[in-house]
Image (spheres, coloured by chain):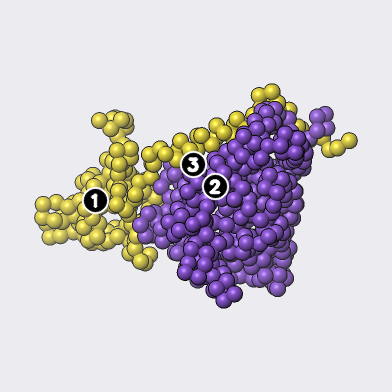
């Protein structure tokens, strides 16, 4: 007696090899002639079928006021909430008592793109961006300083709003 | 004599170049067709429509590091890719690929070597191909490679028999083993193309040829899911490329054989213009084109089937080879030989369309019950005999 292996009985009456093969060949041939779904990436970044979501959370962007200064008031909320602990903030104060960031750096490698910093910011200064093409030649370049954050131009993310779940 | 030598050398060089370029383009065609079947576009970046992709791949493989496993049998390890590669190219030598080319010094038959034993030569060389695979598996000293090599040898031996048997039918009709004669025999009309009088033989030949070339659904020697990459697991860089080239060169050879043995070779259907002297350059070019077209159709079939069918299980492969293909081929030859004897010797028919159509009728009659049985899957359904568990 051979070792007991469970053998599934095949429904012989319903099986078919040649017909199934021919059917499969017809199917693959029809797919061969169908329009293709591939997007030619560097030339074509969105199509009628697909565009990047406005809620996409990518590398950050700091918004600026009319004088071109960062809107940040160095309140310290974003470094506080950041779960990855990747925002470095050193606050400063000018003669009129206005607070501003002396140093504001985000390490984009440590960031998990949760978007909390944008959500928590009282001045709507820091934002996560709708942007995904980040390539640099060295790791240091992924620590974005204030100047670089202000210089970004990509659109900012529209975070999900619990009071408006479908985004209208 | 000098003329013969010069003509042969030129032919060898031309055929070799065409095959190598063809193989390169075939790798690209495979990837693009596979992509299209999967609703993708495939490699289209290097050169126009990706035409330079094979060149880029070749360059990459040349520049890659060659690895040599410490435990490998050095000599055989290095020799194996060549052993796989050379027979693949040798076999094409006896396939006639066009009407003779007239030159000021005489007609040049468009076949590298018009051997009187043409077909036997192909069978002999064809079975040499397995050495490359088996030695690659064995010399790598790697269990996956060894399993791949063993599977390959078992598979090739099993299907070689069916392959040889199916071609016996062709030789029965042609009464000769020279491939030029086989082609000449098929030129009378469209219906004397061997695929009509010998439909089932063509079916067996195709299945066996898929198995011989290790293509899906018979690619067990390299079954990625089970054996990593099978016999060429340990190979890298150019040696790996050689196996790849061998695989595709085998496909080209098998396709050329299908065209020659069953689809009239370089014969252009519906006209006798191309069949007889005086030979002209136009005839040569036209027949070359037709032959290339036929070969391309079979290559497409290869690729199409590969991206449609899943792989056989090993026992199914063996069962199909020994329990279906071999008996089928034997019975078929017996029946066909009888039929030819009756038609030719008893009724005194000469070989023409009527003869071919009569055999074609016989094939259809045989095919109906055969395909019914095959389709029901009684033969390869289960790995365990009824009540065996
Ligand atoms: S997105 Fe999240 S992880 Fe990234 S900096 Fe803002 S709070 Fe930190
Ligand atoms: S939460 Fe906004 S205002 Fe506060 S430190 Fe961060 S960026 Fe500046």
Numbered circle sitting on residue B298: 2
The CA distance from mark 3 to mark 2 is: 21 Å
Query: Is any part of residue A141 visible from this angle?
Result: yes
Q: Which chain is depicted purple?
A: B
Circle 3 packing at 10 Å, graded few (<14), some (14-19), many (20+), is few
User: Could you say which is closer to the camera, residue B144 or residue B337?
Assistant: B337
Asked if disc 1 is less than 8 Å from ligand 1, the answer is no
What's the chain of the residue with tag 3? B
CB-based contact (under 8 Å), mark 3 and mark 2 = no
Task: Kindly identify which residue carries mark 3.
Answer: B270
Circle 1 packing at 10 Å, graded few (<14), some (14-19), many (20+), is some
Q: Residue furthest right?
A: A1
Asked if B365 appears above or below B90 in the picture, the reply is above
Task: Kindly identify which residue carries mark 1.
Answer: A154
What's the chain of the residue with tag 1? A
Colour assignment, chain A: yellow
Residue in the image at 61% along x and 64% along y: B113
The CA distance from mark 2 to mark 1 is: 52 Å
The CA distance from mark 3 to mark 1 is: 66 Å
Image quarter of residue A32 = top left
Q: Is residue B13 left or right of residue B173?
A: left
Numbered circle sitting on residue B300: none
Residue in the image at 46% along x and 61% along y: B54
């Amino acid at each position: 007696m051979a070792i007991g292996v469970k053998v599934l009985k095949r429904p012989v009456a319903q099986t078919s090899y040649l017909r199934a093969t021919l059917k499969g060949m017809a199917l693959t041939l029809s797919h061969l002639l169908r329009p293709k779904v591939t997007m030619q990436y560097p030339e074509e970044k969105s199509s009628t079928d697909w565009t990047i979501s406005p809620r996409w959370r990518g590398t950050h962007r700091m918004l600026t006021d009319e004088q071109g200064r960062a809107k940040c008031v160095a309140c310290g909320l974003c470094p506080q909430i950041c779960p990855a602990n990747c925002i470095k903030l050193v606050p400063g104060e000018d003669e009129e008592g206005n607070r501003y960031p002396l140093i504001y750096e985000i390490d984009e490698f440590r960031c998990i793109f949760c978007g909390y910093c944008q959500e928590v910011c009282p001045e709507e200064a820091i934002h996560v961006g709708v942007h995904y093409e980040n390539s640099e030649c060295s790791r240091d370049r992924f620590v974005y300083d204030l100047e670089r954050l202000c210089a970004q131009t990509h659109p900012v993310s529209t975070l999900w709003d619990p009071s408006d779940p479908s985004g209208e | 004599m000098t003329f013969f030598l010069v003509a042969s050398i030129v032919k060898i060089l031309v055929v070799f170049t065409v095959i190598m370029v063809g193989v390169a383009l075939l790798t690209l065609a495979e990837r693009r067709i596979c992509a299209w079947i999967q609703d993708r576009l495939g490699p289209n970046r290097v050169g126009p429509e990706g035409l330079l992709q094979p060149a880029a791949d070749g360059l990459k493989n040349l520049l890659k590091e060659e690895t040599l496993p410490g435990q490998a049998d050095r000599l055989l390890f290095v020799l194996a890719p060549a052993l796989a590669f050379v027979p693949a190219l040798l076999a094409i030598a006896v396939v006639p690929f066009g009407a003779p080319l007239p030159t000021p010094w005489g007609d040049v038959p468009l076949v590298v070597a018009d051997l009187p034993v043409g077909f036997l030569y192909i069978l002999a060389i064809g079975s040499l191909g397995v050495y490359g695979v088996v030695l690659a598996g064995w010399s790598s000293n790697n269990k996956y490679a060894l399993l791949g090599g063993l599977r390959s040898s078992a598979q090739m031996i099993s299907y070689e028999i069916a392959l040889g048997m199916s071609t016996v039918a062709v030789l029965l009709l042609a009464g000769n083993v020279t491939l030029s004669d086989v082609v000449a025999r098929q030129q009378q009309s469209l219906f004397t193309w061997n695929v009509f009088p010998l439909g089932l033989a063509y079916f067996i030949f195709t299945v066996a040829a898929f198995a011989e070339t290790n293509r899906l659904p018979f690619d067990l020697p390299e079954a990625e899911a089970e054996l990593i990459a099978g016999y060429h697991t340990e190979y890298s860089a150019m040696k790996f490329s050689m196996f790849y080239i061998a695989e595709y060169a085998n496909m080209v050879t098998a396709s050329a054989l299908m065209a020659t043995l069953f689809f009239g070779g370089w014969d252009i259907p519906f006209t006798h213009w191309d069949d007889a002297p005086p030979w002209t350059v136009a005839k040569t070019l036209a027949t070359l084109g037709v032959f290339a077209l036929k070969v391309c159709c079979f290559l497409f079939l290869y690729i199409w089937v590969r991206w449609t069918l899943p792989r056989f299980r090993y026992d199914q492969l063996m069962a199909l080879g020994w329990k279906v293909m071999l008996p089928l081929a034997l019975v078929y030859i017996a029946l066909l030989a009888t039929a030819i004897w009756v038609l030719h010797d008893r009724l005194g028919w000469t070989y023409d369309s009527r003869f071919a159509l009569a055999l074609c009728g016989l094939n259809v009659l045989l095919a109906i019950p055969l395909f019914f049985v095959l389709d029901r899957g009684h033969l390869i359904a289960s790995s365990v005999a009824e009540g065996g568990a």
